[in-house]
Amino acid sequence: MLDHIYGLGRFGMRPGLERVSSLLQSLGNPQSAFKSVHVAGTNGKGSTSCMMASILREGGYHIGLFTSPHLIGFTERIRVDGREIAEEDVVRLGRKVMAAAPAETTFFEMVTTMACLHFAEQQVDLAVMEAGMGGTFDATNALEGILSVITSISLDHSEYLGSSVAAIAREKAGIVKASRPVVISCQEPAAAAEIRMRCHELNSPLYCCGEDFHGEWRENKLFYRGMSVSLDGVTIGLRGSYQRFNAATALAAVEVLGKGDFPMPTAAMTAGMEKAQWPGRMELISSSPRILLDGAHNPAGGRALAEALVEIPHRRLLLVCGVMGDKDLGGILGPILPLTHEVIAVAPRLPRALPSSELAEFCAGQGVAARDGGSVEAGLTTACSMAGAEDLILVCGSLFTVGEARSIILSRPFEPFRG
């Protein structure tokens, strides 16, 4: 079943919502059975989505969460109240969707439809739907969300979304719905201008980080000032001071929802932030040796990761790094390499991965000691043999590298798929 669904990835991105809308209609429009929040952006949309879902669960609501890509296995993509969809439900719903799907339906359109069916069956109160890559033509945009959330926008997937931050923001702002509220994280001026224009055109109320709400980071705690809520000294379950912007955006989104059908006590907001977990993002997954996983895979993510590394005491930083062949190596690794003692270059098990030998050559050319580590498993083994008690092993460069490493450490089967 999954092999067949993964095979649909060959159709790639196909602009337009006609196929997924038709598919949903043929299955009784399951998305009409629950309310939804739509989350798009370049960086932080997964973290923001999981924090929102965690807060809403603490508030007593029955919450669905749809995210992509998965780190280890397909079932991570569809969750209800923090529980992954059961494999037997994947098989059952996959067959149902395949029987109704037009011939050219893409992988992501099918998976989005499966999520909607599952959330309807589970009678969730609200689903947090993370957009896959874009906005306007992303399959998740077939849902009429009650709130749109846009996290930080930067250059990524330019071959699909546009060659400038403004163009990418224009595409991401396609999730804005007429007269429905919009919450945005801190943005570059060009991105903010595009979102403002879209909200003005559609008469959609806009709430901006840094203007309508604020998040400060002091002594590893969040201090939040919102529209009507203030929280002091909140512990966030996700590591990294850069999460203050994602956390503030999630809290503001919950505040906006609270004006409608989802009132939220402040105690639930605090508890939800503390309990939020998002694998593969500044995740300390091993203590002996210390292994940190982070899925930074674009320049903005690389800068945020470098900032966060300063917060973790270590003697030497050993970098196990693997990237996709179409990524900006200098942009991703530029902020991190000066902090690195040695790079062990690897290649995750995807066809578009950059060969580990080429990555090692690039890093050496930047003046950093580097070796060709081969596979993710071999590179991780090498790093562990080199690490002392006070050293830190960082696995980064791609979510697929992080996912494969995580599967090895947890002894779980890895399902590599880009989509």
Image (tube, rainbow, N blue to C red):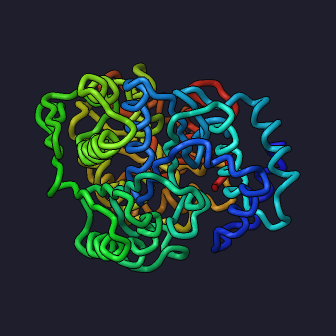
In the rendered image, residue 47, in percent from the top left (x then y), is placed at 40, 42
Q: Residue at x 61, y 38 (%)?
A: 78
For the residue pair 359 and 208, the one nearer the viewer reads as 208
Q: Is residue 209 above or below residue 85?
A: below
Left or right of 208 on screen, residue 380: right
In the rendered image, residue 291, in percent from the top left (x then y), is placed at 42, 30
Q: Is residue 86 above or below residue 200?
A: above
* Quadrant position of the C terminus in the picture: bottom right
Residue 4 seen in the current view: yes
Q: Is residue 159 above or below residue 5?
A: below
Q: Residue at x 40, y 20 (%)?
A: 287
Q: Residue at x 30, y 74 (%)?
A: 200
Left or right of 299 on screen, residue 193: left
Q: Quadrant for residue 265, please give it.
A: top left
Left or right of 96 on screen, residue 406: left
For the residue pair 329 and 29, the one nearer the viewer reads as 29
Q: Is residue 255 above or below residue 21?
A: above
Q: Quadrant for residue 309, please give it.
A: top left
Q: Residue at x 37, y 26 (%)?
A: 59
Q: Quadrant for residue 217, please give it.
A: top left
